[in-house]
Image (spheres, grey):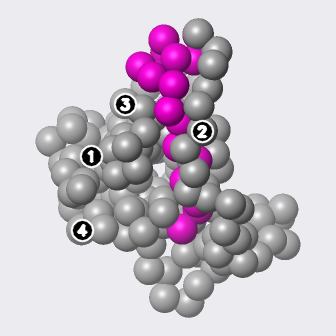
Amino acid sequence: MTQEAQKDFNAMLRQPRDMPRVQTVTDPGTIAKYGGSRMLLAPPLAYDAVMRTVPFGRLTTAGEIRAHLARRHQADFTDPMTAGIFISMAAWASFQRPERDTPNWRTLKAGGELNEKYPGGIPAQRALLEAEGHTVVSRGRTRLRWFVQDYERSLFPLSE
């Protein structure tokens, strides 16, 4: 948190970064992994906007957001690296605003896993999810990871 406290995430969120843009990838491995060559680079505000649509008691995942944005821009997939960075950026930007209007805790990682990079880490996200009626369980022996149990039942359909 020390590093995050020194950054202005709201200013970072608003930087246009020459996005959105769709670029063509040529690496055969990437094309095979993601099912196409048209990769979307979406701006941070796009992730924030989608995260704001998830209502109380419902959930989404980073992968669902990525797929939604790719469909919206007629791309095959969305860059996973920038997606992870921009989702965390949206979480921290909301944390720095008095109104905290982006319910980032409702956006999970793959498989319903909680995101340790959000403000307050796993304990904060867990408390907020449990307050909305979700059950959070741990998995693992040497390295505990936390997941929303049966998260698929609470997935919010992202509209086009």
Residue farthest to the left, as pictured: 153
In the structure shown, which secondary structural element does the residue marked by tag 2 occupy?
strand
Mark drawn on residue 30:
none
State the CA–CA distance, disc 4 to disc 1.
15 Å
Mark drawn on residue 23:
2
Neighbours of disc 4 within 10 Å: few (<14), some (14-19), many (20+): few
Q: Which amino acid does label 2 sit on?
A: Gln
Task: Measuring from the top left, give residue 76's x and y in whole percent.
Answer: 42, 32
Q: Earlier in the sequence, mark 2 or mark 4?
A: 2
State if disc 4 and disc 2 touch (CB < 8 Å): no
Tell which tag, 3 or 1, sits nearer the viewer: 3
Q: In this view, does 63 lie above or below 117?
A: above
Q: What residue type is labelled 4?
A: Phe
State the CA–CA distance, disc 2 to disc 1.
40 Å
The residue where tag 4 is placed is 56
The residue lying at 55 percent from left, 44 percent from top is 22
Mark drawn on residue 135:
1
Q: What residue type is labelled 1?
A: Thr
Image side of residue 54 versus residue 74, left or right: left
Task: Measuring from the top left, give residue 126's x and y in whole percent.
Answer: 42, 53
State the CA–CA distance, disc 2 to disc 4.
35 Å
Is residue 109 among the parts visible in the rendering?
no
State if disc 1 and disc 3 touch (CB < 8 Å): no
Quarter assignment of residue 27: top right
Closest to the observer, 34 or 52: 34
Region rendered in magenta: 29-45
